[in-house]
Amino acid sequence: MDNNKGLTLKGMSGTNFLFIINAAIMVGVSIYLTTHFYEARYPTTLGGGKSLCDISNFFNCDTATFSKVSNIAGIPISFFGIVVGLLFIFSSLMPSQKMEKTASAVARLNFIGCVALFVYSLIGLGALCPFCTVYYALSGIAFFLLWKYGISSWLPDIKVSALWAVLFLIGSFFMYKTTEDKELLKNTLNTSVVEQFRKLQDFGDPDVESPYKIHMATEKFSDSPIRVSIFSDFECPFCAKVSEQLPEIIRRYPKQVSIQYMFYPLDNKCNSNIEGSFHQNACDAAMLAACNEKTFLEVHDEIFAHQSELGSGIIQTLAKKHNLKNCFTDEIKNKVISTINQAAKFKLKSTPTIIVNGKKIEGSVPNNQFFAIFEDILKGGK
């Protein structure tokens, strides 16, 4: 140990200030990840748990959140990050050789753990959590600052580490109890949902498979263990919420769930089951999405993203953007009507209506309840 070194022992230098700011951001990122852990795993509202860092199938927080390494005995590993960041802050605000020695040892072990998690995310999960990656980078900075300017040590001070261990255990206990309570509530609700689902009438899948697919786990829709058909209206706010839920479902069950889209605009321009033009732009939006099967998914996402603008020319704007021509013809209209006609056997009354393996769910439920239904199906439930 070099006694001439001391990142936190020489007053509030620029390097020490950087170390404190870096540690504070570590705490902030860790708090966000801990909050997201509970929101994603135990949502209380439709679409709950939507994350700021769910950018794509590769860059998202949810893959990590639902992985086996996201928690230890119900304690989210991001809680460790909160404790580590606080240790670094206190080592600067209450400087001593013992505190810095402990911070140095923890910084090394923390960084090694971050490297291991980064590699596991890339190889084991095939996805990267952006906020986790920010924490990894911050951990690298903390390790470098302590290695370069501070006391270099692999061994923490026994008394200081014992004190922080006690604080960590107290915090971990509260984290564990929080998870236990949320898990109990979730299981109670999920058990009820699964029992209700099992009792639903089995109508069977739609008689004609839709050419408009959101995700396919198997080459044939009928071969998928979990088959989801969504009767939807592009002007329906709840339908937009369901569309936001789908990426998380696909990430959780990429090889088990197939999802097809069934047009059911609440607009008598193309839907003869509707009295009056309840949603005046719904048929035009449906015809735009139906215009080209190859661009369907991208157009589907963009229409829902601009749902509030459907009456202000956005449909024509999207048609030009995707070079979609002759979309508002009888030919395309008949394609939309063909999926509308599939709703008759389900006695459809409203949108969204979701058919899961032949059973009708009107409206929607939070994803954790969908997951409970899916897990029951995969275990052989009906």
Image: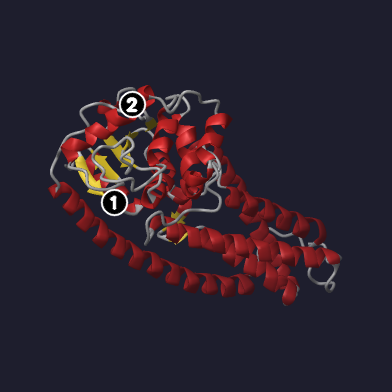
**Which residue is identified by label 1?**
363
Labelled disc at residue 335: 2
Residue 204, x across and y down, in percent: 17, 34
Which is nearer the eye, 116 or 208? 208
Residue 119, x across and y down, in percent: 57, 40
Q: Using residue 85 as the reference point, say whether residue 49 is left or right of it.
A: left
Residue at position x 37%, y 51% in the image:
238
Residue 33, x across and y down, in percent: 53, 58
Determine if residue 272 is in view. Answer: yes
Q: Identify the image quadrant of residue 153.
A: bottom right
Which is nearer the eye, 277 or 58? 277
Residue at position x 58%, y 67% in the image:
83
Which is nearer the eye, 327 or 52? 327
Q: Which of marks 2 and 1 is in front?
A: 2
Q: Which amino acid does label 2 sit on?
A: Lys
Separation (CA) of disc 2 from disc 1: 24 Å
Mark 2 crowdedness (10 Å alpha carbons): few <14, some 14-19, many ≥20: some
Pick the quarter of the image with the N terminus.
bottom right
